[in-house]
Image (cartoon, coloured by chain):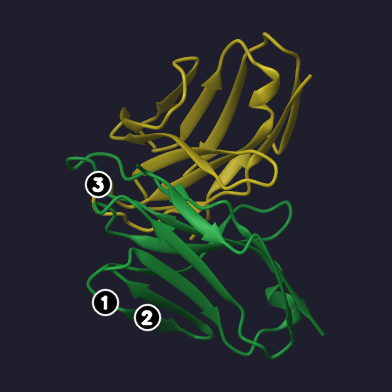
Chain colours: A green, B yellow
Amino acid sequence: QQQVKQSPQSLIVQKGGIPIINCAYENTAFDYFPWYQQFPGKGPALLIAIRPDVSEKKEGRFTISFNKSAKQFSLHIMDSQPGDSATYFCAASWTEGGGADGLTFGKGTHLIIQP
Amino acid sequence: ETGVTQSPTHLIKTRGQQVTLRCSSQSGHNTVSWYQQALGQGPQFIFQYYREEENGRGNFPPRFSGLQFPNYSSELNVNALELDDSALYLCASSSSVFRGKTQYFGPGTRLLVL
């Protein structure tokens, strides 16, 4: 299975709070897990990515936690701001025999940060 | 360094027609991937091009085809358009085809099929 399941579908958090978005995958061959942010009318923009050999990665206010045994990973946004309001997608990929590494995306989380 | 660009930004076609979408990859990137994003959904992988050849394909029928040119730019062609082909078509470029190298997305082309 190539599926990536993402939750919640939507999330409302007060400014300064820590929204958490969760993803689960089935294919143990996945070896690259990025998170993308998308604003209306724009293409997805890479936020942060992790590989399964580490359990946590931080870049600025964004943190990925990765649990290889549970096949789950999550995005935390510290000190959230109204400008973080967007749709967030988790994704995963693997290299098929050295060939293509197309991303499999979750269905997205619509995040609203209230002032 | 220029980012990924796509043209046109919007397009309206009727069922049964053919459409060509274009993508210029980010400077220094040699791999281009195409995705279809239906409204309210995550992008779905259509196919990837590397060294001017299709390098892998998602679950899309043969009427979705593509090209990559020597300057690494790419085209997505869709024949016999169906109403369900209405979506945002995204192009992403990366510097290598191996091991999940970072893919950078363009702004997309919004296709409406009537």
Q: Gap in Å between the C-alphas at discs 3 and 1? A: 19 Å
Amino acid type shown at disc 3:
Thr
The quarter of the rendered structure image containing the C terminus of chain A is bottom right
Q: Secondary structure at mark 3?
A: loop
In the image, residue A111 above or below residue B106: below
Q: State if disc 1 and disc 3 touch (CB < 8 Å).
A: no
Under mark 2, the amino acid is Lys
Q: Which mark is residue A95?
A: 3
Residue indicated by mark 2: A57
Give how far apart the Cα atoms at labels 2 and 3 are.
Answer: 22 Å
Circle 1 SS class: loop
Chain letter, disc 1 residue: A
The mark nearer the N terminus, 3 or 1, is 1
Under mark 1, the amino acid is Val
Q: Is residue B79 above or below residue A52?
A: above
Chain bearing tag 3 is: A
